[in-house]
Amino acid sequence: MRLQDQQLARQLMRLRSDINKLKIEQTCHLHQRMLNDATYELEERDELSDLFCDFPLVSSFSLSTPLKLIGVTKMNINSRRFSLC
């Protein structure tokens, strides 16, 4: 009986660990998508500003609120290339 309890405890601990790993991977993937979207938006603004000189320039450093909430700054996107995963 004790052996079965130990085996069940190990199995539950492995399941918990696997669930935590999946949560981390999902969060990392979502953050990476947000960073990619922000980078794409900045590049698109730069291209548009090159095409339309009389186009009122919008600050290319304005970040969306979700990115600000997770701590992404102008320097993170423009000066450094890095991966969260």
Image: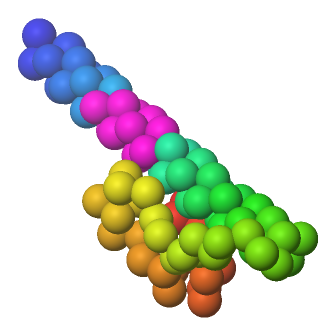
The quarter holding residue 40 reads: bottom right
- Compared with 24, 14 (above or below) is above
Using the rendered image of the protein, determine whether residue 84 is visible from the camera's viewpoint: yes
What residue do we see at 43% from left, 57% from top? Answer: 64
- Compared with 28, 10 (above or below) is above
- Residue 50 screen position, x and y as percent: 85, 77
- Position of 60 with respect to 69 (left or right) is right
Q: Which segment is the magenta one?
A: 16-27
What residue do we see at 84% from left, 70% from top? Answer: 52
Residue closer to the observer: 10 or 82: 82
- Residue 10 screen position, x and y as percent: 26, 30
- Residue 43 screen position, x and y as percent: 75, 68
Residue 20 painted magenta: yes
- Residue 58 screen position, x and y as percent: 58, 71
Considering the image in quadrants, where does the C terminus appear?
Answer: bottom right
Considering the image in quadrants, where does the N terminus appear?
Answer: top left
- Position of 62 with respect to 3 (left or right) is right
